Image (cartoon, rainbow, N blue to C red):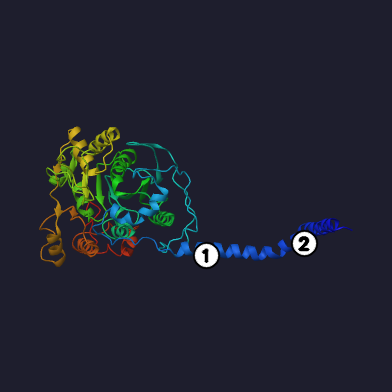
Amino acid sequence: MDKRSLCLLVICVNLCLVIWLVSVQQPQMLETEAPASAAALTAEKDVDVSSETEESPPTPPPPCGKERIGRESRSWSRSWSRSWSSKPNQIHDTPSRIPSYNDSLDLSLTSQAAAPRTPAPQVFTNLMDLHNFAYLMNQPPCDARVQALILVHTSPYNHQKRALIRQTWAEKKYIERTPLRVIFLLADVWHERPSWQHFLDQENAKNGDMVQGNFKDDYRNMTYKHVMALKWFNENCPQAQLLVKVDDDVYMNTPQLVKYLKDPTRAEHDLLLDPNLLLCRPVKAPRVKRSYRSKWRVTYKEYPYRYYPDYCPGFAIVYAPDVARRLFKAAQKAKYFWVDDALITGVLAKETHTKITSLQHVIGKTDTMQLIAGQIGFDYKEFLFAFHGIQPHMCNSLWDLTVETNYTLETSPSSSSAASSSPALSANTSVMSTGLS
């Protein structure tokens, strides 16, 4: 056999050996290696999940602090850049937004895991220039008893502020015995932090008082949230006498509002019946901020004039139903401008010939501290709102003082046990026609 034939024979033998190894031995090798591979994949997945679980959520701001929505969310700009467009008013068509259980949150509302959420029905409508607006979280319409709807503008991360409000001036067992209703308004965080959305779902499942729009929660989207408040009021609470819009770092004296609504002998009672009421503490001749150092800087392209019309600062505004309706209609036709107070209660109020009524029933920090310290009494100055950015201990002290001095839940044979179980409302037992004493 020559050398060439011998080489061909060796090649053929090797080729047959390789074919035999592939066809016969490889399945057995795969069978033995499969458990190890699966274990490796499982371990890798567990590492990914645990790392996501242990990732700490953004630290919630202190309750009743001075930060607004944009300042709380700037630390997440990198994650936004991956999932949101550069426009802050970008919304997302997400009819199904059931959170993944891998997106866990260290902050748990209850000791039990919440059931998967069922998103609100996606009925898309227009909200200014948003043509696919929908509620991601919604509430039933107001019933006939509601005379004043209080809509609280809040950031998704301000759960401590919402909890404080629910423990004080919007305490559930108290509010249910009044002609008031309190709802918190917020926007979407799903694409930014799904674990926070899961937490919000738990919070709403427990309290049933949150309405969420499908636009990004950002300070440059405050106008959408403001117009959403007008929209929700017009569509779900049209029979109410008042819409009250407040920020989540404001103390509202809800018992005093009940007294004004129920007592026809009070001058405030007639004031609140004014069909053209736009009640606030107005900003007079406000100058447009042009400094590059200001978070509220407005370019000449956005607003060409030097001054805004007089407008209502958003921390506390009271609307009559007719005013809420016409401002909403005007906003639907208006060009979007992100400084919501200046646009809605300034520019649009002026266009619709809506005059601002100056609100006198606000106490500042000095009066609040003197009131808490007992240096002045409740008869010194009636108030509906305390100052913007009030501290949490002041909120608690004002509410405790309010309860101990003047008010209690309305008691009846069927509700006396419930009233006595309320930690905040157990001072007196006499009853007025307001449902309070």
- Residue 256 appears left or right of 47: left
Earlier in the chain: of badge 2 and badge 1, it is 2
Q: In this view, does 354 lie above or below 268?
A: above
- Residue 374 appears left or right of 81: left
Q: Is residue 265 in view?
A: no
**Residue that appears at 11% across and 56% down:** 381
Name the residue tied to disc 2.
25
**Residue that appears at 27% across and 60% down:** 168
Where disc 2 sits, the SS reads helix
The image quadrant where one finds the N terminus is bottom right
Dots 2 and 1: beta carbons under 8 Å? no
Q: What residue type is labelled 1?
A: Val
Name the residue tied to disc 1.
47
Residue 407's x, y, as percent?
22, 59
Badge 1: residue crowd in 10 Å (few <14, some 14–19, many ≥20)? few
Q: Is residue 132 above or below residue 360?
A: above
Looking at the picture, tell me which residue is in the foreground, 254 or 13: 13
Residue 102's x, y, as percent?
50, 59
- The quarter of the displayed image where residue 430 is located: bottom left
Q: Is residue 20 in view?
A: yes
Looking at the picture, tell me which residue is in the foreground, 250 or 285: 285
Residue 301's x, y, as percent?
23, 38
The image quadrant where one finds the C terminus is bottom left
